[in-house]
Image: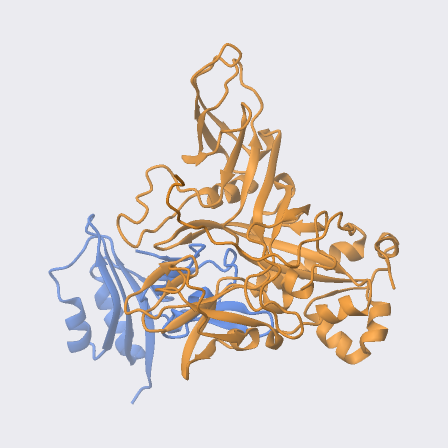
């Protein structure tokens, strides 16, 4: 049996396909374990979905091929929440509010802050607390 | 042992030995106080954090025809015009016109005076809108125009209070979230926030104000400025540890410098959800090692500096002065403190990373001979305390 992997994806639906049970088909037809972090339909009826999918490489590829039939663009590096490394002042205020340690002190001596996107669950706490507005949401 | 003139001579000849306030700790440990005091000329200190009592004086020059501005806005942020015709004072905490503030609580406060100052230093084009009642000598009654910092005659930062010697650790004893100038404080002491560069902070390295006084040359966001007065709320007479380190706010500095020489990355607009806007600013101050005592005090380390933990649900707003406990900066920097037997996650509003960068930038400038020290022309008071504002009946 092939090894399972987990991938974090940001799906953008230029035209929302709300009436279609896409997640259901990913689970039922493509054997994927799905963990949705965040989903949104804008007033312009564009759709955003950030999720983890877990399964074999083959199942994930088949699942994504299915998703693409809905004219969806797939971003494999997440990016629902972004952190501006160049403008961050590294005060570290965000760190106690980040529940998963995605934002963390990378260097105990210089107190440099870093962001591990794979740990981000898109709770948006950092966006509310960063005094400099350097954490942002794609939607 | 050394004089300002001797140290400046060594700086001019490019021979000055300069260390940052964190480097000096290990250096003195290794070399001993007596040897180190002979070798080291300057220790650089720094801080980067929100400094609400900041602002700047702008002079626009005169339009044709002339106007005596009586009300004015830069980027829709109100500026004070009770000065001469085209002089204004822009304050860091001023909100933008029509900002809903806390009407939709907690408000976002996305843009205000501090952000205008950042944009000004960044060289962005800004809008000026001003009104006047018109006079014989200043007939124009309304003006809308666009300018950059290069168009101004002067853009002088004028900060009545910077560089708090020490500061509170804010915590929330209540059952609801609080939105404060110390950040969002979660209910039931879930988190705490502090705001100091600790062992790098200027006045913690010169606790008795022996070298930092009125006239001291400072590095203010990349510009060379100076201390022009004691800062507002300066209270040098507060409680201290046996080593003389203040256990509360204590001393402050009033600073000024030319904004045209500043760097944007050290002048940053700040938004605190539910509270308002402010300015975060980078400051570096050199301490001349005139003798062993001054050197010894620059060796202060985070574990020796105590900060008071204060409840911001009742004690701070009601001005009771109650302190829950004291914790040291080593504990604060670990990310967790203990308050009355319970562990509390702790975060910082002040950037140690930026402070360290500034301390190194200033040290490099001094080593290159580009920054000379200035001897104070007056010293800060060591015995004053902070007076409250009394709410009194009108005297009969």
- In the image, what residue occupies the spot 50% across and 34% down? B125
Query: Does B211 appear above or below B88?
Result: below
Query: Does B121 appear above or below B388?
Result: above
B337 or B335, which is in the foreground?
A: B337
Picture colour for chain A: blue
Quarter holding residue A47: bottom left
Residue sitting at the far left: A19
How is colour applied across the structure in the image?
Answer: by chain
| Spot occupied by residue B395 in the image (x, y as percentages of width and height) | 40, 41
Q: In which quadrant will I find the C terminus of chain B?
A: top left
Picture colour for chain B: orange
| Spot occupied by residue B330 in the image (x, y as percentages of width and height) | 56, 76
Quarter holding residue B239: bottom right
| Spot occupied by residue B105 in the image (x, y as percentages of width and height) | 28, 53
Query: Does B32 appear above or below B391?
Result: below
Locate residue B7 relative to residue B84 in the image: left or right: right
Locate residue B307 relative to residue B244 in the image: left or right: left
| Spot occupied by residue A8 in the image (x, y as percentages of width and height) | 33, 71
- In the image, what residue occupies the spot 21% across and 80% down? A31
Query: Does A29 appear above or below A41?
Result: below
């Amino acid at each position: 049996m092939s090894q399972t992997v987990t991938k974090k994806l940001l799906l953008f639906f230029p035209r929302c396909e709300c009436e279609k049970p896409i997640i259901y088909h990913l689970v039922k037809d493509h054997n994927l374990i799905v963990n949705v972090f965040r989903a949104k339909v804008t007033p312009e009826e564009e759709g955003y979905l950030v999720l983890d999918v877990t399964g074999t490489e083959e199942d994930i590829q088949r699942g994504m091929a299915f998703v693409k039939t809905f004219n969806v663009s797939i971003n494999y590096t997440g990016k629902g929440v972004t952190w501006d490394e160049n403008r961050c002042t590294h005060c570290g205020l965000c760190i106690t509010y980040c529940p998963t340690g995605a934002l963390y002190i990378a260097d105990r001596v210089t107190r440099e802050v870093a962001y591990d996107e794979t740990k981000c669950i898109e709770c948006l706490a950092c966006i509310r607390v960063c005094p400099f507005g350097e954490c942002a949401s794609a939607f | 042992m050394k004089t300002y003139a001797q140290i400046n001579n060594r700086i001019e000849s490019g021979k000055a030995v300069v260390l940052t306030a964190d480097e000096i700790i290990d250096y003195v440990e290794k070399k001993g106080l007596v040897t180190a005091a002979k070798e080291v000329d300057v220790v650089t200190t720094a801080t980067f954090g929100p400094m609400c009592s900041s602002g700047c004086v702008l002079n626009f020059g005169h339009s044709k025809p002339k106007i005596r501005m009586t009300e004015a806005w830069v980027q829709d942020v109100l500026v004070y015009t009770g000065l001469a015709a085209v002089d204004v004072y822009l304050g860091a905490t001023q909100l933008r016109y029509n900002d809903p503030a806390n009407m939709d609580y907690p408000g976002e406060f996305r843009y205000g005076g501090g952000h205008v100052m950042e944009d000004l230093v960044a060289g962005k084009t800004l809008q000026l809108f001003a009104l006047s009642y018109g006079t014989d000598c200043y007939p124009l009654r309304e003006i809308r125009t666009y300018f950059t910092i290069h168009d101004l005659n002067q853009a002088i930062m004028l900060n009545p209070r910077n560089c708090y010697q020490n500061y509170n650790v804010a915590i929330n004893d209540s059952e609801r979230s609080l939105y404060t100038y110390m950040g969002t404080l979660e209910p039931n002491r879930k988190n705490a926030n502090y705001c100091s560069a600790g062992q790098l902070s200027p006045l913690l390295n010169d606790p008795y104000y022996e070298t930092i006084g009125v006239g001291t040359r400072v590095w203010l966001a990349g510009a060379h400025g100076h201390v022009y007065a004691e800062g507002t709320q300066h209270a040098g007479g507060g409680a201290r540890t046996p080593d003389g380190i203040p256990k509360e706010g204590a001393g402050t500095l009033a600073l000024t410098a030319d904004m045209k020489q500043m760097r944007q990355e050290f002048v940053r607009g700040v938004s605190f959800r539910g509270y308002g806007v402010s300015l975060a600013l980078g400051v570096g101050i050199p301490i001349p090692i005139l003798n062993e005592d001054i050197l010894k005090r620059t060796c202060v380390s985070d574990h020796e500096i105590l900060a008071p933990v204060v409840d911001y649900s009742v004690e701070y707003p009601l001005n009771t002065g109650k302190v829950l406990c004291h914790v040291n900066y080593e504990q604060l920097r670990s990310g967790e403190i203990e308050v009355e037997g319970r562990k509390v996650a702790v975060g910082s509003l002040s950037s140690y990373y930026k402070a360290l960068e500034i301390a190194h930038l200033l040290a490099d400038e001094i080593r290159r001979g580009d920054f000379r020290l200035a001897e104070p022309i007056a010293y800060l008071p060591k015995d004053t305390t902070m007076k409250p504002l009394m709410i009194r009946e009108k005297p009969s």
